[in-house]
Image (spheres, rainbow, N blue to C red):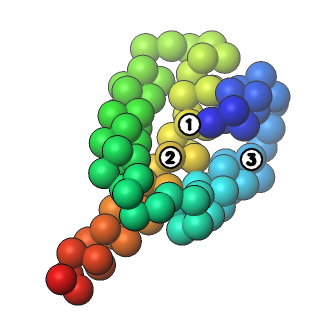
Amino acid sequence: MILAVIFGFVAAGEWLAWTLVVLGIIIGLLNIAEKEVKPFLFAGTVLVIVAALGGGVFENWLKTILDNMLFLFVPATIVVALRSVMVLAKK
């Protein structure tokens, strides 16, 4: 999330979006433990909704930060949700 804020002040191209997406996937795969799944999914979902809706309100550097947060948290949330479904399906 710190990277999303820092990159909100940097004029970057398409590489930044792909970098944040890849980092989000890595976070979702490697950084969320089993006991953190529910809180992460709840917080991640709320963050994605607020960032998506808030991005339509602002037209300055804050919109860029919110967009960067979306690039980071959407893939991480999807990966963690899919892992959670797989665990539920095995039970």
Q: Is residue 45 visible?
A: no
Residue 73 badge: 2
Task: Examine the image and state in which quarter residue 89 appears.
Answer: bottom left
Q: Which residue is mark 3?
A: 16
Instruction: Classify mark 3: helix, strand or loop.
Output: helix
Q: Amino acid at mark 1?
A: Met
Report how far apart the C-alphas of labels 2 and 1 lie in the structure. Answer: 6 Å
Determine the image quadrant of residue 63.
top right
Helix, strand or loop for disc 2? helix
Secondary structure found at label 1: helix
Q: How many labels, in total?
A: 3
Q: Position of residue 46 (x, y in %)?
A: 33, 34
- Three-letter residue code for mark 3: Leu
Q: Position of residue 56 (x, y in %)?
A: 43, 21
Q: Which mark is nearer the camera, 2 or 3?
A: 2
Q: In this image, 57 relative to 10: left or right?
A: left
Tell me, yes or no, whether the two marked residues, 2 and 1, touch with CB atoms within 8 Å.
yes
Q: Nearer the viewer, residue 52 or 77?
A: 77
Quarter occupied by residue 64 = top right
**Amino acid type, label 2:** Phe
The mark closer to the camera, 3 or 1, is 1
Spot occupied by residue 40 in the image (x, y as percentages of width and height): 40, 47
> Which residue in the structure is indicated by mark 1?
69
Whether residue 76 is visible, yes or no, is yes
Which tag, 2 or 3, sits closer to the chain's start? 3
Residue 40: which numbered mark, if any?
A: none
